[in-house]
Image: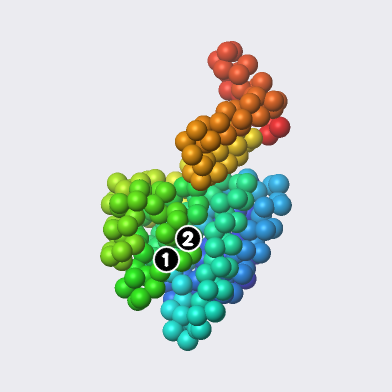
Amino acid sequence: MSAGSLLYREEQGIGYITLNRPEVLNALNRDMLSGLLSLLGEIGTDSSVRGIIITGAGEKAFSAGADIQFLTAASAHEVRDLARLAIDVNHAIETLGKVSVAAINGYALGGGLELAEACMLRLAVPQAQMGHPEVRIGAVAGWGGTTRLPRLIGKGRAAELLLTGRQITAPEAERFGLVNKVVPGTDLLGEAEALLREILSQGPVAVALTWEAVHRGLNMTAEESALLGADYFGLAASTEDFREGTKAFLKKVKPSFKGR
């Protein structure tokens, strides 16, 4: 599928989404965000797709963030509406019910980084630069950055990046915990695929419930989160996959999960 500013293909259970505006460093505008939201809706109901990889076209950027040309001419209401659309997109990624990996191939700034933060996991090339420069143009990280970044790297580090607008390198992002792994550019998609397939080889129901427990648990007290994990453990125990996995463990053989 090609929709101009978005490219999409599916191969062996993985959906590949490419942000395709390399001439403006894959800046996110309303059309691209609307297309992403629609595409994610289709992927969510496609049982043949078990995971997605999101990356940017070209060698310079994953996404440099919101389209500044739009922001300079937009009204406050238009900026808010764009932010709410972006929040819907990022929420759709988090609640897709599929494993999501951001393959950061260059600059991931502002709204572009917020898109990557919504994914379960993030890989980046060594030359990638990440940051929230919104304050440097008198703006706020209003697409979820003020929410997700502290949860990923802690309040102190997040506050530093959000309040200074400083960009960090991929190795620094890895040390902070923002990026899971830094890989050579030629290996980026291959590494993302390998990581995704490693997760997909586990029990599908268990993977989905684990992510749900992590995602929902962050908004609960420690006790509530632990109880949610216990409930999901019990729910997983009711599946055929659980019986298959425990028997395979005892027999010291590889389990054959069916996703039920």
Checking the image for residue 98, the label placed there is none
Q: Position of residue 249 (x, y in %)?
A: 57, 17
Distance from disc 1 to disc 2, alpha carbons, whole Å, reads: 7 Å
What percent of the width, then of the height, locates residue 209? 60, 37
Q: Mark 1: which amino acid? A: Ala
- The picture places residue 162, in percent across and down from the top left corner, at 34, 62
Instruction: Categorize mark 1 by other alpha carbons within 10 Å: few (<14), some (14-19), many (20+).
Output: many
Secondary structure found at label 2: loop
Q: In this view, does 45 lie above or below 217?
A: below
> Relative to residue 46, is residue 156 drawn left or right?
left
Quadrant placement of the C terminus: top right
Residue 141, label in figure: 1
**205 or 81, which lies in front?**
81
Residue 48 shows in the view: yes
> Which residue: 31% across, 64% down?
163
Query: Residue at label 2?
Result: 144
